[in-house]
Amino acid sequence: MTDSPAASLALLGGQPEITTPAPHFSWPPIDSRDIEAVTGQLTEAVSIPDRSGIVADLEVALAAWLGVRHVVTTSTGTAALHSMYAAAGIGPGDEVLVPALTFHATATPLLHLGARPVLVDVNADGQLGLATAASLVSPRTKALVAVHLWGLPENADALAAFAGEHGVMLLEDGSHAHGASWNGRLVGTYGRAAAFSLNGPKPLAAGEGGFVATDDTELYYRLLLHGQYNKRCRTEIPAGHRLAKYATTGQGLKLRIHPLAAALARAQLHRLEGYLTGRAACAERLCAALEDVPGLRVPRLGPAARASWYALPLRYESAALGGLPLARFLAAVHAEGATEVDHPGSTRPLGDHPLFHAPRELIPHYPVGQDTALGGCRGAASVHASTLKLPVWHRPEDSALADAYTAALAKVARHHKELL
Ligand SMILES: *Cc1c(COP(=O)(O)O)cnc(C)c1O
């Protein structure tokens, strides 16, 4: 298959590998069950001020799925993170260890609470560097947040040991990782509390939405007071509780999920396990096809890890392709029609964002003199600079598309000299 004109690169005038029009991946998959659930909800209730109806159904179902005592749904994952940090008692002067490579919303709510995000560099495999984290613990360190990037679970045992050893609270941002697990233990159950997004592309998606999961009943009451004021607080916080007097106003923020989003999330949750099984098979297929392609390294998961495969992160090794820059490689892959191969834009080193360098210009109450600890974080920079991600399809009928994607990647790698 070397030198026929059809085999030359599309970027250089050859035939593209994929001619099916984009998009090649859309999420969440919507079928008649979703349409029934959402339209049914339209006539049932579109505003739910207490924990009843679809909001209660969804929270009960999420809590049962995770095996936790409490779930509070929210308008977004960002709101879930904000509520989780607030409810965990994180405030001015506190330090929170955050992976240096994540979506910015893992850390931005901390700025609003006046807490100091302390960035922890990631290892070569993109996972939180616990030795580095240990060196950053101070008397002000209150918590460590684990993010299971792209749905590849962090080592839960190591995280729990770290939290115990250093006396810090373990929290999770499970927004990429619904259903991922470590040694059979689901992401979202490792620590004191976990926040999840239900945003459009996430493994469990409601368009917009989020939730916090916890076994801690006090934290649960504080979640309600943070973003679910009035009825929920009045009916769920016991009258004799010290904070019950605040029930009507809470903290004054209203971060409730929309009932139509809750209905969609509830319908999707029934199918999550099927999605994950399908994605695991697809990820295996993609990795097998790419394993021997020079310049691309597939992720290796140990036997303890089950991923949600929010995406398949590949590491691009330009040295193996004569120094071909990632951007040029990616342009050639896109020209082949594999348009959903992506170099992550917003999930990048947090130190890249001006907000973390100068938060007070936008958040004037951020404590003066409390700089965010951005560190060097060369691991995060190099992992990000060399990451390409692929969609992971869940339906067997998308295998041909998955194969076409890996064929496009292999073709560009094979012809890399023509791009130099
Ligand atoms: C999507 C995401 C968020 C934010 O969730 P939204 O629902 O978009 O507000 C937070 N953290 C991570 C890791 C995410 O991927």
Image (cartoon, grey):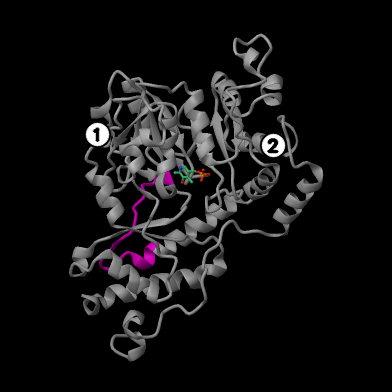
- Can residue 407 be seen in this snapshot? no
Q: Can residue 397 be seen in this snapshot?
A: yes
* Residue drawn 67% across the image and 20% down it: 248
Q: Is residue 237 above or below residue 3?
A: above
Q: Is residue 263 above or below residue 86?
A: below
- What x and y, as percent, mark residue 255? 60, 34
Q: Amino acid at mark 2?
A: Val
- Mark 2, Cα crowd under 10 Å, few <14 / some 14-19 / many 20+, is many
Q: Secondary structure at mark 2?
A: helix
What residue is disc 2 on?
Answer: 55
Q: Could you tell whether 419 is left or right of 407 in the image?
A: left
Upstream in the sequence, badge 2 or badge 1?
2
The location of residue 58, given as percent across then percent down, is 67, 39
State which region is magenta: 287-306
- Nearer the observer, 228 or 292: 228
Quadrant housing residue 263 = top right
The N terminus lies in quadrant: bottom left
Tell whether 57 sits left or right of 355.
right
Image: 386 above or below 232: below
